[in-house]
Image (cartoon, rainbow, N blue to C red):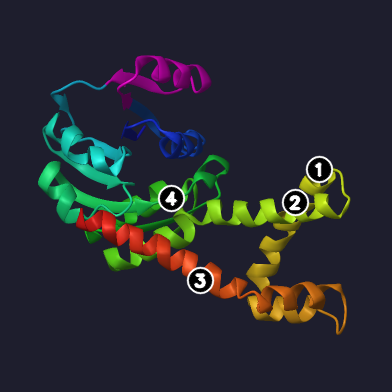
Amino acid sequence: MKKITFIGNGNMAQAIISGLLKSSYEIEVIGRDINKLEALKKQMPQITIGLFTAGFDITNKDVIFSVKPFNLIEVGAKLTGSANTLYSVLAGTTIESLKKNISANSYIRTMPNVSAKFLKSMTTLTGNANSKDKSIDIFNCIGTTLWVDTENELDIATAVAGSGPAFLAHFADGIIAGGVKSGLKEEDAITLTQGLFDGFIPLLSDDKPKDIITKVMSPNGTTEAGYNYLVKNNVKEEISNTIQTAYNRALELAKN
């Protein structure tokens, strides 16, 4: 059985672990808080856990590195040996920075999203080409993967698909609030919005967004009234600016 070691056990790590446990991987999770580790072990008894201490040996391990970006130097200084492949999920953290702090034979930057828990992550990958196929195989276990050729493209993809669930959740929250404001019970507004998002996925797979709009919108109908409000208030442009703002933050993290 193939083994993967997680260093870090936050929300993103837990989402990936939950997905990988449905495959054939053996999972080792290393963290700083024994209480959190034991709680995770209770939820996922298949994993093995270990407390992170100075001198932790990563020799020949395949490591998914999932700590906060600002902890890279501190954690890296406490690792010994050289990993087989280091998979980093640290937003805005370049391969050059990883190499300066952690030794490995191969480096992959990856940006999954929290839908990994449901095997629906949209994961972007880049890094050493000799580990491309292996990294795609691993992250295909939690959803869909996209390999890009540059780290800059990965930073853009982070803003789109890594941060995207939060942006979509904000939009969903607005739809729910609109339904409630118009007179729906909150639980009914939530049910309708869940069904809306679930049904939208095959639409987006089948058509371009502009074609979906054309098919849904009848002249002088309810959709046109709402759509014209979106256009009047530059919502498309503001969504685009949201992605750009998140991407700019990734660039700032890389500089720091």
Q: CA distance from mark 2 to mark 1?
A: 7 Å
Q: Are marks 2 and 1 in contact (CB under 8 Å)?
A: yes
Label of residue 186 in the image: 1
Q: Which residue is mark 3?
A: 240
Membership of 33 in magenta stretch: yes
Residue 148, can we see it?
no
Query: What kind of residue is marked 4?
Result: Pro
Density class for disc 4 (Cα within 10 Å; few <14, some 14-19, many ≥20) is: many
Q: Residues within 10 Å of mark 2 (few under 14, many from 20)?
A: many
Outermost residue toward the bottom? Answer: 219
Amino acid carrying label 2: it is: Ile
| Residue identifier under label 2 | 176
Q: Which mark is residue 112?
A: 4
Which SS class for mark 3? Answer: helix
Of the image marks 2 and 4, the number of the one nearer the N terminus: 4
Nearer the N terminus, badge 4 or badge 1? 4
Q: CA distance from mark 2 to mark 4?
A: 27 Å
Q: Please say if 63 is above or below 253.
A: above
